[in-house]
Amino acid sequence: MIQKQKVVVDFSSPNIAKEMHVGHLRSTIIGESICRVLEFMGHDVARTNHVGDWGTQFGMLIAYMREAYPDYETNFPDVRDLDTYYKAARARFDSDPAFKKLSQETVVRLQAYDETCIKAWKLICNVSREYFKIIYKRLDITVEEFGESFYNSFIPPMIEELTAKGLIQEDATKTKKGVKK
């Protein structure tokens, strides 16, 4: 007889600012298959989906939204076609150094819980989540989502703990701006 264990299976982990692609579907189906086998064997399975919801792409999308829709706070634009919206924001990010800097500053404000950025971020995330739900329902997939943002509040105490234990060392090959010497 097999001893019951707690098993964590990580699923597709899509970037919430863009559409899922075939790679996400493949890993989702594999993850679901593994979960079903483990559950059949009697194990306690945690079905986790770590989504990309906190990085540069959101600074880029929010900055683009502000530019393209100055009244977006009161009249939220239709961004159901996130792929097209993302590609337009990405083109600006790649071609315009001022927009790139603005996007990077915007993600810093988002991660500092700026109210305006959080509101736009939630709206964008919800568009993707609704799309993901349709796909997961059609495939009969059950997952529990944990975005990168979920871990944000855990980072400062972890850094403090690791520092106190002497386990953190600054990389001497980096300058203060993170560029190699």
Image: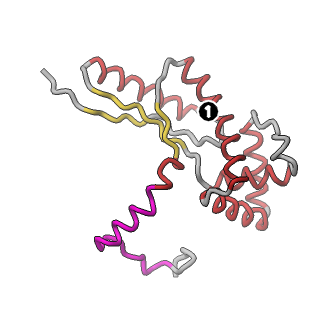
Residue located farthest toward the left when viewing the structure as drawn = 1
User: Which image quadrant for residue 80?
Assistant: top right
Vertical position of residue 39 compared to residue 126: above or below = above
Q: Which residues are magenta?
A: 154-174
Residue 117: % across, % down? 70, 53
Quadrant in which the N terminus is drawn = top left
Circle 1: is it few (<14), some (14-19), or many (20+) Cα within 10 Å? Answer: some
The verdict on residue 155 being magenta is yes
- Residue 176, percent across and down? 54, 79
Residue at 36 percent of width and 32 percent of height = 46
| Secondary element type, mark 1 | helix
Which residue type carries mark 1?
Arg
Q: How is the image coloured?
A: secondary structure
The residue sitting at 40% across, 66% down in the picture is: 159
Which percent across, then down, holds residue 13?
51, 39
* Quarter of the rendering containing residue 52: top right
Name the residue located 47 percent from the left edge and 51 percent from the top edge: 151
The verdict on residue 114 being magenta is no
* Residue lying at 60% horizontally and 29% vertically, measured from the top left: 132
Residue linked to disc 1 = 129
Nearer the observer, 119 or 55: 119
Q: Nearer the viewer, residue 157 or 130?
A: 157
* Left or right placement of residue 148 versus residue 63 in this view: left
* Place of residue 91 in the rendered image (x, y in percent of width and height, measured from the top left): 77, 53
**Between 138 and 157, which is closer to the camera in this rendering?**
157
Question: Total number of numbered labels?
Answer: 1
Horizontal side of 113 relative to 70 (left or right) equals: left
Q: Nearer the viewer, residue 49 or 92?
A: 49
